[in-house]
Image: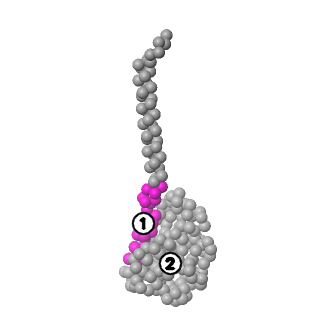
């Protein structure tokens, strides 16, 4: 019969479940607080921008082994295009060219912003595309020493990127090849044409 006294084992189990519940709540709230910073930590670990910056560094280093690429003469940077469809770019090709521009500017090169110029061959939303026959005309019109052009090819696991610095007379002054992993982010940039 129940005489109003609690069973000691039941009291012990009740205390344990309260402690277990308290610990579970603290852990849940702590994890939820950390979750807000998770995408930023992922973004800081992403190697996409540093990889493109290293490619710009290597491209300029390869060009300096040939005719000198002076810092004060303007450089144009065209949107990278799909190697299978040379008149087509994507968000991937456009963002790589933007990052190459940024890196060249950080290296104290004079970079002409093509999006502000109406006379460059532009296909919206493709970006600034240049055909080889146009390079001489465009570099002369902007008093530029060279143009950075590039292509990309999409494989099953990687995206293969080729960059070239092309001089006024369509001479390749330097080149650099590199790969990017085919991730959810790069696939999204490729599909957003």
Mark 1 = which residue? 50
Q: Position of residue 38 (x, y in %)?
A: 46, 53
Read off the magenta span. 39-62
| Crowding at mark 1 (Cα within 10 Å: few <14, some 14-19, many 20+) | few
Whether residue 53 appears in magenta in the rendering, the answer is: yes
Q: Which mark is residue 32?
A: none
Quadrant of residue 189 in the image? bottom right
* Residue 53 visible in the displayed image: yes
Is 86 drawn above or below residue 167 in the view shown?
above
Which SS type dominates the magenta stretch?
A: helix
CA gap between label 2 and label 1 equals 18 Å
Is 82 left or right of 102, judged from the image as shown?
A: right
Is 69 drawn above or below residue 87 in the view shown?
below
Residue at x-position 47% and y-position 12%:
3
Counting residues from the start of the chain, the first of labels 2 and 1 encountered is 1
* Residue 166 visible in the displayed image: no
Determine the residue located farthest toward the top in the rendered image: 1
Quarter of the picture containing the C terminus is bottom right
Secondary structure beneath label 1: helix
Determine the residue located farthest toward the right in the rendered image: 124
Residue at x-position 44% and y-position 16%:
5
Is 22 drawn above or below residue 126 in the view shown?
above
Residue at x-position 45% and y-position 54%:
37
Residue at x-position 51% and y-position 58%:
183
Quadrant of residue 110 in the image? bottom left
Q: Which mark is residue 77?
A: 2
Front residue (pair 17, 84) = 17
């Amino acid at each position: 019969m129940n005489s109003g006294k609690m069973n000691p084992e039941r009291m012990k189990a009740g205390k344990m479940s309260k402690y277990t519940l308290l610990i579970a709540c603290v852990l849940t709230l702590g994890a939820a607080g950390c979750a807000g910073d998770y995408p930023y930590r992922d973004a800081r670990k992403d190697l996409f921008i540093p990889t493109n910056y290293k490619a710009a560094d290597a491209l300029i280093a390869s060009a300096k082994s040939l005719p000198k690429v002076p810092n004060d003469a303007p450089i144009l940077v065209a949107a990278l295009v799909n190697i299978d469809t040379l008149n087509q770019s994507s968000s991937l090709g456009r963002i790589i060219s933007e990052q190459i521009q940024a890196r060249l500017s950080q290296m104290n090169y004079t970079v002409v912003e093509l999006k502000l110029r109406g006379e460059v061959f532009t296909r919206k939303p493709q970006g600034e595309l240049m055909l080889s026959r146009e390079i001489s005309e465009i570099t002369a019109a902007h008093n530029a020493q060279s143009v950075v052009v590039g292509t990309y090819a999409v494989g099953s696991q990687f995206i293969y990127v080729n960059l070239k610095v092309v001089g006024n007379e369509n001479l390749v002054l330097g080149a650099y090849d590199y790969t990017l992993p085919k991730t959810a982010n790069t696939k999204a940039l490729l599909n957003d044409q």
